[in-house]
Image (cartoon, rainbow, N blue to C red):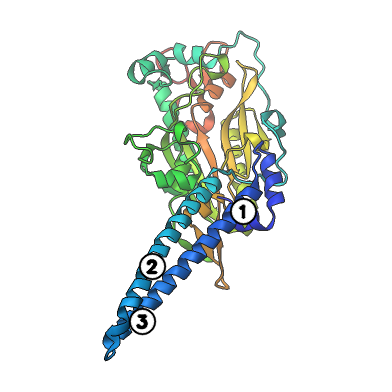
Amino acid sequence: MLDITLIRTDPERVRTALAKRGVQVDLYDFLDMDTDYRAAVTRTEQARADRNRISTQIGAAMRAPGGADGIAALQARAAELGEQVAVAEAESEELRRVRSAFLDGLPNLPDDDVVAGGKENNQVLRTAGQAPQFDFPAADHVALAERLKLIDYRGGARLGGTGFWIYTGDGALLEWALLNYFIDAHRRDGYEFVLPPHLLTYEAGYVAGQFPKFADDVFTVDGKAQGRFLLPTSETALVNLHRGQVLTEAELPRRYFAFSPCYRREIGGYRTTERGTLRGHQFHKVEMFAFTAPGDSEAVHAELLDKAERLVAGLGLHYRVTRLAAEDTSAAMAKTFDVEVWLPSIGDYVEVSSVSNARDYQARRGGIRHRSSDGTTAFVHTLNGSGLATSRLLPAILEQHQRPDGSVAVPEVLRRWFPDLVVSSRRRGRA
């Protein structure tokens, strides 16, 4: 949620920043409504105060000798004020509802260094490693996964429908090795491990910025407009860990990571860039999350990005880092860096980690503050980063590390949990 004080004091700055996202809003109409709302609240409070004053006078009159003679007039005035309170409350509540709906629909303001426009304006900041060059007919990840019996695509569709798959045999072991690799790295770095519930309340989605605007992107389970839903990412749960709390300055930054399946309504089609496990209704992800004081926000953002990069580099993959343009940055975030791995079969990069800073946007929704040493309070900043998602990493590993004999070399960092040097169609054994 945006700072209402900023909108009141500098609406042009807000309008210009939102325009970078392609969002055109008339903030002056909103400010007129905001003025009406505050006036209605004042009228409500005044009417309540007048009613309470009359009630006090009625009580005093009833206790005084002969005071009952004036009670009828006071009671009539109390009834009149009661009607005024009811009207004022209804008016202020309706204005509050419309005002809140407008504010809830506004995305976060992109940072000043985030360029305007869509993904065509994303900025590649750096590349790392070398794209593999093959002197043999290279296979794509779907063919490799099927040949090596790592993923059962047809079985997944048979069990769950389009957009699901089954990791089998060595594929399941590789998936689990990847997750263990991520978890082990985050634990070494001192992050606190969390296993969140997979069913969340509407309020949790609201704090994360998922609701109300993006309610159609999730799987709901109660059949209610504001019922429970399957978490689309652990971030949605982690941002709510300190909802409604005031953290001390000494407690910050708070660093967490979580593992969960992620459930999304949106999936891809049968195009080359969306086949296999690249896009689906359910996939695995380890998510990093941090609560920080505003002054530490930039440093922690850089820390999360560095961690995501080190994980990808440890797998021996060629990748790049991109700063997203404003329209390609998710609504709740002020700035996002994507870590993207090279997928030879499509001749392009695919995102495996988004590392984002929400500034105080989510904290305002969740009422998450910190108290400084001088006793003042302010909203915390929240940051998140995939660390990492597996459904695109496994395709990149298969394609970038494939060998002429059809086998795939296993990255060394995974051999603690998957001791074979290669995955091949033969019975597993040392190469």
In the picture of the structure, the residue carrying the numbered disc 2 is 80
- The percent coordinates of residue 239 (x first, y second) are 47, 49
Q: Position of residue 109 (x, y in %)?
A: 64, 46
Q: Residue furthest top?
A: 137
CA distance for labels 1 and 3: 38 Å
Tell which circle, 2 or 1, labels the residue nearer the N-terminal end.
1
Q: Nearer the viewer, mark 1 or mark 3?
A: 3
Q: Mark 2 falls on what kind of element? A: helix
Q: Quadrant of residue 271?
A: top right
Q: Residue 143: x, y in percent?
A: 50, 11
Question: What is the x, y in percent for residue 236?
Answer: 46, 43
Mark 2, residues whose alpha carbon is within 10 Å: few (<14), some, or many (≥20)? few
Disc 3 to disc 2, C-alpha distance: 15 Å
Residue marked by disc 1 = 32
Q: Which is more N-terminal, label 2 or label 3?
A: 3
Give the mark nearest the N terminus, 1 or 3.
1
Crowding at label 1, few (<14), some or many (≥20) Cα neighbours within 10 Å? Answer: few
Q: Secondary structure at mark 3?
A: helix
Q: Which residue is mark 3?
A: 57
Tell me the kind of residue under disc 2.
Answer: Glu
Q: Nearer the viewer, residue 12 or 431?
A: 12
Q: Secondary structure at mark 1?
A: helix
Q: Tell me how far mark 2 sits from mark 1, CA to CA.
A: 29 Å
Residue 284 showing in the rendered view: no
Residue name at image x 62 percent, y 45 percent: 334
